[in-house]
Image: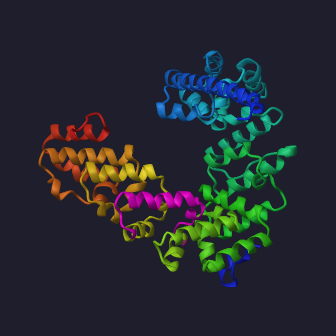
């Protein structure tokens, strides 16, 4: 099946309508009411998470997309239950972040009995809090709760002792999953990746016959078992038969890719092999129709960043239009795509916001962005704005001439440590000024525009 991948050289108003209209109006009113109620619940949830668990507004907002509630009775009872069982504030925060639906559970009828069951089986309070904190979703289980608990505890203890053998008895229907996860652990897969698999029911984790065979192939391809990409590859390999693989390989070959190219792309983005023929060819043709790259250049871009084949046609065309609207020439867009293939799929608003910031507010030339498109992939809040604020502070002091700005790469690509050494600590003869620059860098002090 995967010999083509593994061995490249062998290749891979009418009145009657009024009643309906009235019904539509009522539905619309109900939807509006529901929407308002949902917004109220979301706002309450965010406030609760910030006030009760000290979550950041950003994290609270993210969690409110998964669970909402209108009063604090249930979440309060859940938090109090955990505290009464010895869970620390840090552990509770970790549990709620990973499994926020627990806040809507009935603490006494749903969660408490499970905790009591585990304690009655000999779990110490410290073992209970540590294990549940590692995999809070096991509390969603009923019959298999003890199975998963024992497995997590075994792994935690085994890792503490630096041993590689788990003495786990057969566990009925859960045997396959635990055996497979144990095999992944023996390959060096870390706990942070192993434990979420316990609540997964996907075939590549619960399967039996093809698991070992597929696992061996993924290892032979050189995937690193400590990375999520390993699991992506395993899922793809187990989910496709020989015939399907041959068909996908043929599609890529018709586009001019060699078997070796296909293997390289698979190792960079395993999911690319699961894309439909229509999706593959359409994305490739859309990028080609943009007139930015020649065939060989386009193949090189796809080989470097096969994820671009997953971009929608609309997304690709909108990206090109955004770049053109900002003043980039087609040649400059082509250069950016070759240097940073991911840029062809960036959201228009993101590209526009970052480009206008460095060009209009910081006065770097548009060409600088074309030469260093990586700036479009950097975080505005964590990287671009803090560093640019320091640059502006230095300009205001005359230590950097506005017409002689450092290059974008020099200011933005280096690590924080190198940036501070280059632009802040070099002024350490003036401790007050260095403290001021650090305050600007951390956002404690605003700079004048």
Looking at this view, name the residue that lies furthest to the top: 73
* Residue 311 visible, this angle: no
418, above or below 69, in the image? below
Q: Quadrant of the N terminus?
A: bottom right
Measuring 62% from the left and 64% from the top, which residue is drawn there? Answer: 223
Instruction: Give whichever of 209, 20 is nearer the camera.
Output: 20
**Left or right for 123, reference 227:** right
* Main secondary-structure element of the magenta-colored stretch: helix
| Residue 322 in magenta stretch | yes
The x and y percentages for residue 194 are 67, 48
Q: Nearer the viewer, residue 172 or 156?
A: 172
Q: Is residue 257 left or right of residue 385?
A: right
Image quadrant assignment for residue 262: bottom right
Image position, residue 358 (x, y; %): 30, 52
Looking at the image, residue 322 lies above or below residue 430: below
- Tell me what residue is drawn at x 26 percent, y 48 percent: 361
Residue at the limit of the structure toward the front, as seen here: 14
View extreme (bottom): residue: 9
Q: Using the rendered view, name the quadrant where residue 149 is placed.
A: top right
Q: Residue at x 20, y 57 (%)?
A: 405
- On the question of residue 395 being in view, the answer is yes
In-front residue for pair 273/108: 273
Instruction: Report the side of 158 relative to 402 (left or right).
Output: right
On the image, the x and y values in percent for residue 442 come to 31, 39
What range of the chain is rendered magenta?
303-330
């Amino acid at each position: 099946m995967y010999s083509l991948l593994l061995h490249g050289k062998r290749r891979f108003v009418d009145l009657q309508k009024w009643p309906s209209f009235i019904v539509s109006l009522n539905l619309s009113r109900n939807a509006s009411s529901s929407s308002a109620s949902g917004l109220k619940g979301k706002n309450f949830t965010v406030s609760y998470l910030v006030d009760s668990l000290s979550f950041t507004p950003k994290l609270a907002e993210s969690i409110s997309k998964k669970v909402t509630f209108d009063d604090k009775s249930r979440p309060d009872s859940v938090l109090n239950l955990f505290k009464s069982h010895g869970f620390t504030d840090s552990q509770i925060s970790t549990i709620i972040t990973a499994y926020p639906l627990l806040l809507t559970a009935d603490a006494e009828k749903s969660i408490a009995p499970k905790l009591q069951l585990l304690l009655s089986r000999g779990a110490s309070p410290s073992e209970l809090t540590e294990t549940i904190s590692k995999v809070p979703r096991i509390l969603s289980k009923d019959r298999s709760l003890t199975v998963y608990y024992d497995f997590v505890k075994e792994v935690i203890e085994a890792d503490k002792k630096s041993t590689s053998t788990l003495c786990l008895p057969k566990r009925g229907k859960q045997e396959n999953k635990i055996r497979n996860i144990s095999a992944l652990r023996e390959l060096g897969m870390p706990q942070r990746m192993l434990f979420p698999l316990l609540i997964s029911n996907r075939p590549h984790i619960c399967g039996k016959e093809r698991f070992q065979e597929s696992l061996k192939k993924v290892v032979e391809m050189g995937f690193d078992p400590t990375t999520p990409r390993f699991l992506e590859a395993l899922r793809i390999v187990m989910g496709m038969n020989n015939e399907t693989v041959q068909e996908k390989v043929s599609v890529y070959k018709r586009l001019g890719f060699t078997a070796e190219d296909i293997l390289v792309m698979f190792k960079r983005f395993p999911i690319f092999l699961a894309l439909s023929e229509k999706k593959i060819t359409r994305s490739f043709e859309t990028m080609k129709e943009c007139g930015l790259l020649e065939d060989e250049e386009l193949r090189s871009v796809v080989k470097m960043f096969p994820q671009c084949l997953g971009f929608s046609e609309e997304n690709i065309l909108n990206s090109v239009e955004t770049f053109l609207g900002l003043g980039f020439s087609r040649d400059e867009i082509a250069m950016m795509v070759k240097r940073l293939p991911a840029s062809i799929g960036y959201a228009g608003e993101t590209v526009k916001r970052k480009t206008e910031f460095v060009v209009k507010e910081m006065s770097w030339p548009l060409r600088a962005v074309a030469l260093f498109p990586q700036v479009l992939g950097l975080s505005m809040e964590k990287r671009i704005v803090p560093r640019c604020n320091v640059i502006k502070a230095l300009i205001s002091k005359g230590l950097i001439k506005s017409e002689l700005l450092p290059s974008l790469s020099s200011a933005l690509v280096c690590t924080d440590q190198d940036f501070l050494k280059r632009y802040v600590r070099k002024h350490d003869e003036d401790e007050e000024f260095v403290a001021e620059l650090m305050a600007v860098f951390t956002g404690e002090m605003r700079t004048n525009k």
